[in-house]
Image: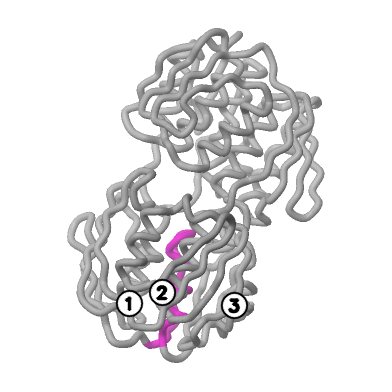
Amino acid sequence: MDKLLITGGNRLAGDITVAGAKNAALPILCAGLLTAGDIDLHNLPQLQDVRTMLKLLRQMGLRVEINGERAQLNGAMIDKPEAPYEMVKTMRASILVLGPLLARFGEARVSLPGGCAIGSRPVDQHIRGLQAMGAEISIEAGYIHARAKRLKGARIVTDMVTVTGTENLLMAATLADGVTVLENAAREPEVTDLANLLVKMGAKIEGIGTDRLKIEGVASLHGAEHQVIADRIETGTFLCAVAATGGDVTLRNTRADLLDSAMDKLREAGAVLSSGADWIRVQMDSRPRAVSFRTTEYPGFPTDMQAQFMAVNVVAEGSSNATETIFENRFMHVQEMNRLGANIVIEGNTAIVQGVDKLVGAPVMATDLRASASLVIAGLAAQGQTLVDRIYHLDRGYDRMELKLRAVGAQIERVS
């Protein structure tokens, strides 16, 4: 099993090219199920989750041709509207095939998904929404069975803001009979990116980027060409790495407007940030200042940046609070950071961090995707060597992270 060996203490300097967004790419790949036409994608990240999704889609009959960060999908020969447990147990995003399969083929059989063990992520919002559109749904032996001759437009108000729920219902509504209105819709940039692709495919969607989406169903969708947006979480992760270690790094192929809240917090911590249309420069010449934050839905501070920002706070001057409101089990990195000498105490859904003068390298274990990224940042800031185990979590969401960090001066290598 691969691990990352990090020798900390180096400032970071140079350029890093940010990959396409994992959380945009996965629903966009599922949108290939909605049409018999060709979907040409650019800036597709080369990640384990993307490879898993492509394997699942191929098994359904979707034709996939990959050339680096480009992909062509064709759904003319889909003959198996089923997502088996063996294919989806490692990735909760597999639930995103449910809406498109049901809308286009009238039925779907999808295993209940797996993924990171960071808390309860019920799919009941997906199911209730599809039932409101006329689907008959049962859950048997760990599988969701859904049937509908043709989905009907409906007004759907979800009990909570759910990104994958919004994406699933949005895709389903594009081929439904009549008008669907999604209230309390997620506004994340990845949802907007999916909606923009669907419009290119012939969907009729109003309110893109807002919490109220109005979709007028069409008889069929056609092919389109689309570039996946930059990964704002990868961008934020590298910004935090520079804030924790010091340095001067320019991130390419990314957009500052995708993570305003996290950048505001980094400025509070003392980072100097400048940006253009497709780049962000971060400079850090002093010890960071402790900054408190609270995770919430977009455009608030993203839960997917909580662990990485905590890695900045553990070496910051002063004390801070990190309050997690999205997932109830997302502090599993705390115990591992404390092994490096951090001073973190958990009270309920808040982590209280007292900054320390230095961290000292030690063996640590990744427990989920973003936790693993936070341990890499802590290792870069620590004195001596840190060995990060179970980095298969990291590979699910970061494209060759160690190569990008090594190019800007980090001492980091993958070992078996």
The quarter of the picture where residue 127 lies is top left
Residue 288 marker: 1
* Mark 2 residue crowding within 10 angstroms, few (<14) / some (14–19) / many (20+): many
Residue 68: % across, % down: 77, 55
Q: Name the residue type under label 1.
A: Pro
Let me know if residue 389 is in the magenta part: no
For marks 2 and 3, the one nearer the N-term is 3
- List the residue tagged with mark 3: 14
Q: Answer above or below: position of 310 versus 73.
A: below
Residue 406: % across, % down: 61, 79
- Disc count in the image? 3
Identify the residue at horizontal 45%, vertical 75% (top origin).
283
Q: Which residues are magenta?
A: 360-382
Q: Answer above or below: position of 332 versus 43.
A: below
Q: Label 2 to label 3, Cα distance in Å?
A: 14 Å
Q: Name the residue type under label 2.
A: Ala
**What secondary structure is found at the residue carrying circle 2?**
helix
Identify the residue at horizontal 52%, vertical 64% (top origin).
280
Camera-nearest residue between 230 and 175: 230
Are discs 1 and 2 less than 8 Å apart at CB?
yes
Residue 64: % across, % down: 78, 40
For marks 1 and 2, the one nearer the N-term is 2
Q: On the rendered structure, is 63 left or right of 237?
A: right
Residue 29: % across, % down: 66, 39
Q: On the rendered structure, is 194 left or right of 224?
A: left
Residue 243 marker: 2
* Mark 1 residue crowding within 10 angstroms, few (<14) / some (14–19) / many (20+): many
Q: Label 1 to label 2, Cα distance in Å?
A: 7 Å
Identify the residue at horizontal 58%, vertical 50% (top origin).
22
